Image (cartoon, rainbow, N blue to C red):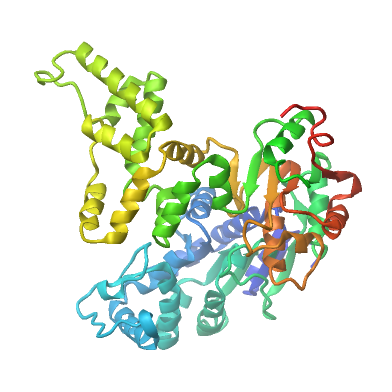
Amino acid sequence: MASRSISEQVIDCLGKNKSFIVEAGAGSGKTHTLIEALSHLLARRSDDYLSFGQQIVCITYTNVAVNEIMSRINSDPLVHVSTIHDFLWSVIRDHQKELRQCILEANKRNEGSKHIDNLNLAGISIEYWQYGSRWQEGKIHHDDVISLASIMFFSYPKLSRLVADKYPVIFIDEYQDTQETVVDLLFDVLKNSSKGSLTLGFFGDYMQKIYGTGIGKLDRPELISIQKLENYRCSTEVIRVLNKLRPELQQVAASNNTPRGSAQFFYTRDENIGIETLRKRLRNEGWKSSEKILMLTRKSIAKSLGWEDLRSLYTSKNRFALDDLLRGDDAFSDTFQAIENSVTAFDNRRYGDLYTILSVRRQKDHELFSNPSEYKIYISQVIGELKELCRSATIGQVLDHIWNKSLIPKSNRIIGLEDKAQSNEDICTFISNLREIPYPQVSALYRYLNDKTPFSTKHGTKGEEYDDVIVVINDRSWNKYNFASVLENNVDKKQYERSLNLFYVCCSRARNNLAVLMESEANNDTIAGARRIFGDEHVIELSRDKGCDGIQD
């Protein structure tokens, strides 16, 4: 079997109804193999699926991945592509009576503050939403979907059989990020219910498990193991580093024309020397100005880009507040974006866009602006004032300006939040603190959100690739990781595995050039470990005298 291509091995498993796992290193074209498997099934079994009202299921981790796979199979309706939460919800949502009963049973097992006294769901329709659980209102969170689906499948075997009959093939993309509960559900409930007719296909890489809830390495004796060793993404120097990090899966360049590229490790003993010093040095070495900078946390990025107070305030507000702000679902998000867009449109003389944003418009017979010239003079004045405030004033002063001048209306969400603040001290304090933050932090945040900076979190780049990558590691920034343990190969450190996986993911984003900067102190053992992975000549101490080749800071 080893002499055959990966696709041939997968097709052989599908033909024999044998469940399998494709272990594919970074840059190996895992998604391409998955698409080939889907295409094979659609070409051979479409008529059967149509006759029996069946579908192939393809479970992936993000909505972005869902859209990518759908586009590559031309949105064929015989393939149900979704996240695990959306898939499970799709098969349990119509069973409202059973859902309510399972929620009541789950509530009985909850202890302390999680238990809801006198929970009554009679007549309440259960719905799935993205925020926290509100069982008393019939609203379940995505974590609830998995646990409730598991309870339902175990409690109602008929439901398991119906699902197994409808979906004879289930592919799981990025299997390493799938919760163990889900894996057990697929194997121990659905597959058993199918009496051997259900085929499971797992595609992923356990070394790319960077989320705490994922199963990571999957060891099931019933799975046929298929390894994919080619690397279609990275230069040979980056591949060399990846193979040092992962000796059990030695990748090879997929083409003889793969560029050599570079992979270097930098450290410094001077805390005043950091990322900008390194970027200057890399420019001297021929790097372009379009590199991606991967940092550990939003905290690190916020500090580097100047929106740390904003991040800190939203982090302290509640568990989901910062996520809401970053995805544009906070009460102030639309207003902040409108302010930024207004200033940008004015600077670029896109007056049509500007007038679309603003609530103050010249109308025929309007008492304030009876002619175009009056309106333009007014807009020039108030936008000019707004620009100046955005550079130096507080968020509160900017908001008061746009509302007092009727530039942008106060949104219903902000009005609602202010109404709640009348009786909620925490909300009142939050709004007060937000108003005191310098507005330039908002501008800095939106430059980041609109991809106007080279920075990203390491987690946020999973699945992405860039020509040139700088990875910044700092063991002082978060005790969840210990990158020194990776360099020193200290497997006994409890943070070792998650640090290794995240480091591997980050390094494997680079198509051409890779530079790692260790900002925390590097001892002799750490430096020796870096030399083992990167090579003696590629481990460099960064300093003003030695590291920058005469560049003046």
The picture places residue 264, in percent across and down from the top left corner, at 80, 44
Q: Can the viewer see residue 322 in this picture?
A: no
Up-down relation of residue 481 to residue 312 (above or below): below
- The quadrant the N terminus occupies is bottom right
The picture places residue 155, in percent across and down from the top left corner, at 41, 87
Q: Between residues 73 and 115, which one lies in front from this camera angle?
A: 115
Tell me which residue sits at (42%, 54%) in the image: 314
- The quadrant the C terminus occupies is top right
Up-down relation of residue 349 to residue 73 (above or below): above
The picture places residue 530, in percent across and down from the top left corner, at 83, 54
Which corner quadrant of the image does residue 133 belong to? bottom left
Q: Between residues 528 and 255, which one lies in front from this camera angle?
A: 528
Which corner quadrant of the image does residue 353 belong to? top left
Tell me which residue sits at (57%, 62%) in the image: 41
The picture places residue 451, in percent across and down from the top left corner, at 52, 38
Up-down relation of residue 238 to residue 152 (above or below): above
Q: Can the viewer see residue 33 in this picture?
A: yes
Is 523 displayed left or right of 296 in the figure? right
Tell me which residue sits at (58%, 64%) in the image: 211
Is 6 displayed left or right of 73 in the figure? right
Q: How many marks?
A: 0
Residue sitting at the far right = 536
Up-down relation of residue 455 to residue 151 (above or below): above
Tell me which residue sits at (72%, 62%) in the image: 500
Is 469 displayed left or right of 354 in the figure? right
Q: Between residues 12 and 159, which one lies in front from this camera angle?
A: 159
